[in-house]
Amino acid sequence: MNSIGYARVSTSGQTLDAQLEQLCVAGCGVVFKETMSGARSDRPELKRALDALAEGDVLIVTRLDRLARSTRDLLDIVHTIETRGAKLKALTDSWADTTTPTGKLILTVLGGLAEFERSLIAERTAEGRDRARRAGKRLGRPFKLTAYQRETALKMRAEGKDNAEIARVLGVSRSTISRTR
């Protein structure tokens, strides 16, 4: 079992020293260091840390906010860690320790709540779309052509003009004209 550390600060003006000291005391043989906002999902050092995990390893962070900015992000990262047969441990957030049954339970409950929230959002969104359709609202992107331009395009097509020529006259793409009915 290896203890792999991950330390992150948001800006280059901040220092990793306190995190590195805590991770060293926790027994991390390797520590991946990152200077990047936690809001970004494309953090290369986090990816390297996750890729370095093997069966039985533990990824250690000083605090969960160093690892993830949202519950969804945290759950995705925990899923990746567990897929590799590894565990997560946050030094100051003792409840976020998948090496213990209690920590695993808490993260499982959080996962269930996040899934429940996603299904509620999807349900409300579908209801809103249905209500808008019944009210006669058109959903989707706005039309590229005005009603007058659409009429003009249809007349020009009836006169035998090709789509490319109509598009040049109206200042739109040929595919916009080809979709016009």
Image (cartoon, grey):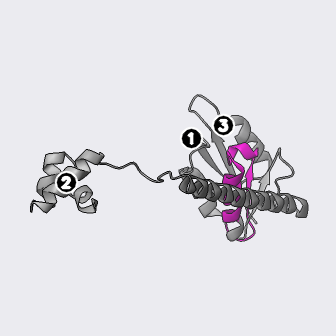
**Mark 1 or 3 closer to N-term?**
3
Q: Is residue 104 left or right of residue 47?
A: right
Q: Nearer the viewer, residue 119 or 11?
A: 119
Which label number is shown at residue 36?
1
Q: Are marks 2 and 1 in contact (CB under 8 Å)?
A: no
Could you say where residue 165 lies in the image, as x and y percent from the top left?
A: 11, 55
Residue beneath disc 2: 153
Q: Residue at x 45, y 53 (%)?
A: 140
User: Would you say residue 62 is visible in this rendering?
Assistant: no
Instruction: Give above or below for 85 relative to 132.
Output: below
Instruction: Give above or below for 171 relative to 51.
Output: above
The residue carrying pointer 3 sits among few (fewer than 14), some (14 to 19) or many (20 or more) residues within 10 Å by Cα, namely some
- Quarter holding the N terminus is bottom right
The quarter of the displayed image where residue 178 is located: bottom left
Q: Are marks 1 and 3 in contact (CB under 8 Å)?
A: no
Measure the C-alpha gap from mark 3 to mark 2: 62 Å
Measure the C-alpha gap from mark 2 to mark 1: 51 Å
Measure the C-alpha gap from mark 1 to mark 3: 12 Å
What's under tag 1, amino acid-wise? Met
Q: Residue at x 77, y 42 (%)?
A: 22
The single residue placed furthest to the top in the displayed view is 13
Over which residues does the magenta segment extend? Answer: 54-81
Q: Is residue 138 left or right of residue 66?
A: left
Could you say where residue 125 lies in the image, as x and y percent from the top left?
A: 62, 55
The residue carrying pointer 1 sits among few (fewer than 14), some (14 to 19) or many (20 or more) residues within 10 Å by Cα, namely some
Which label number is shown at residue 16?
3
Q: Nearer the viewer, residue 127 or 27?
A: 127
Look at the numbered disc 3 and give the secondary structure of its residue: loop
